[in-house]
Image (cartoon, rainbow, N blue to C red):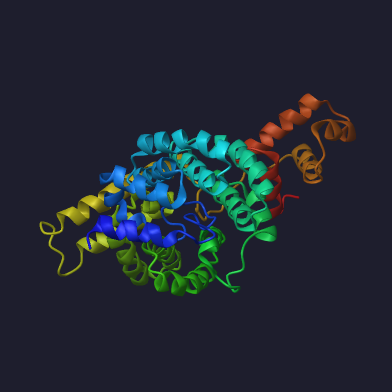
Amino acid sequence: MDSLDELIFAIKSVNGNEDKLTANTVTTINGNIDLSVYADAITNNQDEVIDVLEKNFGNGSNIYKIFTAEIYYQKNECYKALVQAVSAIPFLQTAGEYELLFSAMYIQMCVMIVTGQVNAIYPMIDSMGDWINKSKNDELISNHKALGAWCALYDDDWYVIDDWLKQYAPDENAEIKINNVFSLFVKARIYLVKQKNMAAISLLEMVKPLLEKENRVMYLCELNILYSLACYAEGEMLDAFNKFNIAFEISKEYGYDRLVADEGEIMYKFLLDYEEWIKNLPDFDIKKESDKLDYINRLINLSKEMALLYPRYLRIHKLDYEKLTLSEIEVLRLMADDRTNDQIAKFLRITVNTVKFHSKNIFKKLGVKNRHMAVRIAKEEGFI
């Protein structure tokens, strides 16, 4: 059986499942089953794939566009990915195909993130919430909440992240299903930022048996990426490199470039150490392994780009903040009480412009973009 026949058989096997392709998560190509391993068969056999999709699900051409958008994105062909995803969105909106629409918009958002437009994503998340909530699909609603927390990690918005952790994050000790793996991986990343590396490893170990049982290649790649970063943060370098070896070989074979690179600065630093470790292995032959080194360098360059765009993403750090004035602390305390600028001005007997002036200085000193982030850091650092 060649790869096209295997792909067609896999697609037909999904038909009849209530979750269809997406499993109510962010992806079609790695939703109910992992079709990402057939990327070449999908892109090289457009007519045949559209035909089998149409017969089994309808919307064949639009599903195909999402398939190829996800494939192009992983290979860092972001323009192609965006064109494919965006061209499908209007038709999916009209048809009310919310599960597929969610996947298409997710790829659109991924492209926006890697091109430095994370702030433009929040209105999209809000608009998605309107029709997702109307669908009354609990699994879709849950993954939408997780998507918001994932985007907030790039924006370093801990107001959103902490709210998700308190209200919506899945319990890794409960039953684990494919439709909550995306949410669990978001939670693992938050554990990394909070330096709860053992909690991240425990979570990943809980997820691993299901992924191995169902042979979920793409998810196993992501799991080993996160596992290696947790070991790396703990200083367990050999374990980190061995775990990443697994992810690296999968990524290299199937072209999951962005899956690796989207982890940004922590991955960039890790890859530099990984490259050095590889080169110093006793049996490593630079000439014979040139393809491997070339791919490592590709991932290094891509992760460096993400690190420059989002230097705070997944970064563990303590800043020496510039000292706040008494007036700024007073304003911060009232911000923490959710008071408006007008209310703060009236209470402190100052003008609204003076409140805005203090707010601007607070944001600058704390390195934040809004009052929610300022209050969060102020509380963490004991300023208020």
Judging depth in this view, the residue of 78 and 283 nearest the camera is 78
Can residue 269 be seen in this snapshot? yes
Q: Quadrant of residue 64?
A: top left
- Which residue corresponds to the image point at 61% horizontal and 64% vertical from the top-left? 170
Return the residue found at the far front.
55
The location of residue 46, given as percent across then percent down, is 30, 43
- Which residue corresponds to the image point at 58% horizontal and 70% vertical from the top-left? 172
- Which residue corresponds to the image point at 81% horizontal and 35% vertical from the top-left? 340
In the rendered view, tell whether residue 360 sits above or below residue 272: above
Left or right: 72 in relation to 135: left
Left or right: 208 in relation to 186: left
Left or right: 280 in relation to 158: left
The location of residue 95, given as percent across then percent down, is 56, 39
The quadrant of the image that shows the N terminus is bottom left
Can residue 377 be seen in this snapshot? no
Q: Quadrant of residue 165?
A: bottom right
Q: Quadrant of residue 167?
A: bottom right
The location of residue 33, given as percent across then percent down, is 42, 61
The location of residue 343, given as percent across then percent down, is 86, 34
Judging depth in this view, the residue of 376 and 89 nearest the camera is 89
Count numbered badges in the picture: 0
Left or right: 320 in relation to 64: right
